[in-house]
Image (cartoon, rainbow, N blue to C red):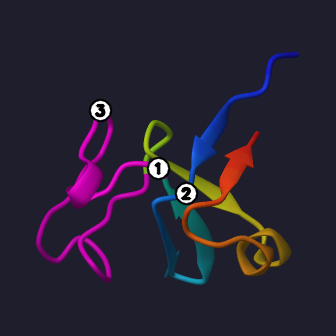
Amino acid sequence: MISSCFTIREKKIIDGKYYFYFNTPLNDGPGYSSGDGLNSGGYIPDKYSSGIVDKDTYDSTNIGDKYCE
């Protein structure tokens, strides 16, 4: 199985779930979605620009780190 690796550009906790973002407004790319009032900070998690992780993974990584799935 081939794994994909991404650079974490942003981390957010939304509705008690932990997300890494790979594209942000400063590094806009395919799959990034934003809008007013959609959630805390205007981010919409989607499978192309974000990934949901568990709390331990979220806490043990930093923005700028590589994340492989």
- Disc 3: which residue: 30
Amino acid tagged 2: Ile
- Disc 2: which residue: 8
Label 3 vs label 1: CA separation? Answer: 10 Å
Seen at 70% across and 50% down, the residue is 67
Name the element at disc 2: loop
- Residue 22's disc number: 1
Seen at 80% across and 76% down, the residue is 60
Q: Mark 3 or 1 closer to N-term?
A: 1
Q: Nearer the viewer, residue 10 or 14?
A: 10
Q: Is residue 53 left or right of residue 36?
A: right
Label 1 vs label 2: CA separation? Answer: 5 Å
Amino acid tagged 1: Phe
Q: Is residue 58 left or right of residue 45?
A: right
Amino acid tagged 3: Pro
Q: Is residue 60 above or below residue 52?
A: below
Is residue 30 in the magenta section?
A: yes
Q: Residues within 10 Å of mark 3 (few under 14, many from 20)?
A: few
Point out the frontmost of discs 3 and 2. Answer: 2
Name the element at disc 3: loop
Q: Is residue 1 above or below residue 32?
A: above
